[in-house]
Image (cartoon, helix red, strand yellow):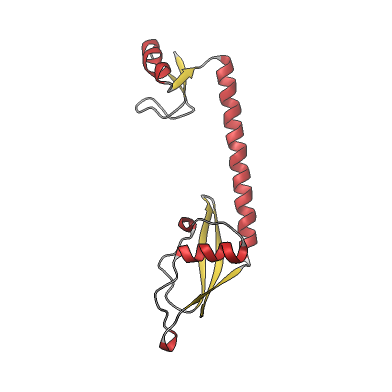
Amino acid sequence: MKVILLEDVKTVGKKGEVVEVSDAYARNVLLKKGQGKEATGKNMNDLKLQKANAEKQAQEALAAANALAENMKEKQIKIAVKTGEKGRVFGSVSSKEIAEEIKAQLGYDIDKKKIQLAAPIRELGVTIVPVKLHPKVTAQISVQVVEA
């Protein structure tokens, strides 16, 4: 029997795949647990429509990420930190602080996990910080650390 999987099933397949399994396994396990549905003409058509919709949404997300990356390219944020003698910074500037300043100064709501700092910023000056907006799009924003 052909079955459309509604979720990932170990040793059978991934969500959205059409798999051939024995009639007994399909009826007694996959259909009963709600892990799959029979691959009828209507269900196959619904699957095609869902895949097309998901692909359209993925394209829109990629376009939005590219537009945001273009907007962020020329932007710079300023972060004021306390310093000691000779311009040494007390502590450091983390990705959390950068995300908060991006929201405050530019109005973009970016998760701190998307800011890819190799190490926290520990000195005054300008640093280029990569921001992963989408798996295929990485923007760069300029962070200027100034004395408070």
Residue at 45% x, 79% y: name it: 82
Residue 142 rendering spot, x and y as whole percentages: 56, 69
Does 128 sit above or below residue 85?
above
Residue at 42% x, 75% y: name it: 122
The image quadrant that residue 72 belongs to is: bottom right
* Quarter the N terminus occupies: top left
Decide if residue 35 is on the left or right side of residue 137.
left
Residue at 59% x, 21% y: name it: 45
Does 120 sit above or below residue 146?
above
How many numbered marks, from 0 up? 0
Q: Of all residues shown, which one is farthest toward the bottom?
A: 86
Instruction: Please tell me which residue lies in front, 134 or 94.
Output: 94
Residue at 58% x, 41% y: name it: 58
Does 30 sit above or below residue 144?
above
Residue 44 rendering spot, x and y as whole percentages: 56, 20
Residue 90 rendering spot, x and y as whole percentages: 40, 78
Decide if residue 64 is on the left or right side of residue 18.
right
Q: Of all residues shown, which one is farthest toward the left?
A: 11
Decide if residue 148 is on the left or right side of residue 71.
left
Residue 143 rendering spot, x and y as whole percentages: 53, 71
